[in-house]
């Protein structure tokens, strides 16, 4: 069973930065793409960033140039560096493991999910 545990959320002023981390259990972390999703109240869950097994990346248009996803296969972790945060980035952020190794950008392509961490950006 794969477990994903997020950390690093919190409250930050607009323009500030946060770094989210996700620790994964299991021995096959490096084989799978990993993603960060977010869900704001009343809105659908959306893919923020994804990283394939070999480091290819995908970003939601609204976060390009501000967010950076990275992975450390030796430590089975995936991180999301978020800079120049905006109030519209406020949401619960989820770490997820994809069903395969290539880039995935839809929630249905992910089989394991963390419990989420709250990110709140004040104006």
Image (cartoon, grey):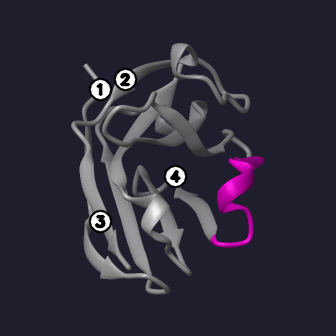
> Residue at the spot x=26%, y=43% of the render?
116
How crowded is the residue under tag 3: few (<14 C-alpha within 10 Å), some, or many (20+)? many
- The secondary element bearing badge 1 is classed as loop
* Cα–Cα span, label 4 and label 3: 29 Å
Magenta-colored stretch includes residue 114: no
Q: Nearer the viewer, mark 2 or mark 1?
A: 2
* Cα–Cα span, label 2 and label 1: 7 Å
Magenta-colored stretch includes residue 58: yes
Q: Are marks 3 and 1 in contact (CB under 8 Å)?
A: no
Q: Nearer the viewer, residue 99 or 42?
A: 42
Residue beneath label 4, please? Answer: 73
* Cα–Cα span, label 2 and label 4: 17 Å
The C terminus - image quarter: bottom left
Residue beneath label 2, please? Answer: 112
When asked about the image quadrant of residue 75, the answer is bottom left
Residue 49 makes an appearance in the image: yes
| Residue 110 percent location from the top left of the image | 50, 21
The answer to which of marks 4 and 3 sits earlier in the sequence is 4
The N terminus - image quarter: top left
The answer to which of marks 3 and 2 sits earlier in the sequence is 2
- The secondary element bearing badge 3 is classed as strand
- The secondary element bearing badge 4 is classed as loop
How crowded is the residue under tag 2: few (<14 C-alpha within 10 Å), some, or many (20+)? some
| Residue 107 percent location from the top left of the image | 52, 22
């Amino acid at each position: 069973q794969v477990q994903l545990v997020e950390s690093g959320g919190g409250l930050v002023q607009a323009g500030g930065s946060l770094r989210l981390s996700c620790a994964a259990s299991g021995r096959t972390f490096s084989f799978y793409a990993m993603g960060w999703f977010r869900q704001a109240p009343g809105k659908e869950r959306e893919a923020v960033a994804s990283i394939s097994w070999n480091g290819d990346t995908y970003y939601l248009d609204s976060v390009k140039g501000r967010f950076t996803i990275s992975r450390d296969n030796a430590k089975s972790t995936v991180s999301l560096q978020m800079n120049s945060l905006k109030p519209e980035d406020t949401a619960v952020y989820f770490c997820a493991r994809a069903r395969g190794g290539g880039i995935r950008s839809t929630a249905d392509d992910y089989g394991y999910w963390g419990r989420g961490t709250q990110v709140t950006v004040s104006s």
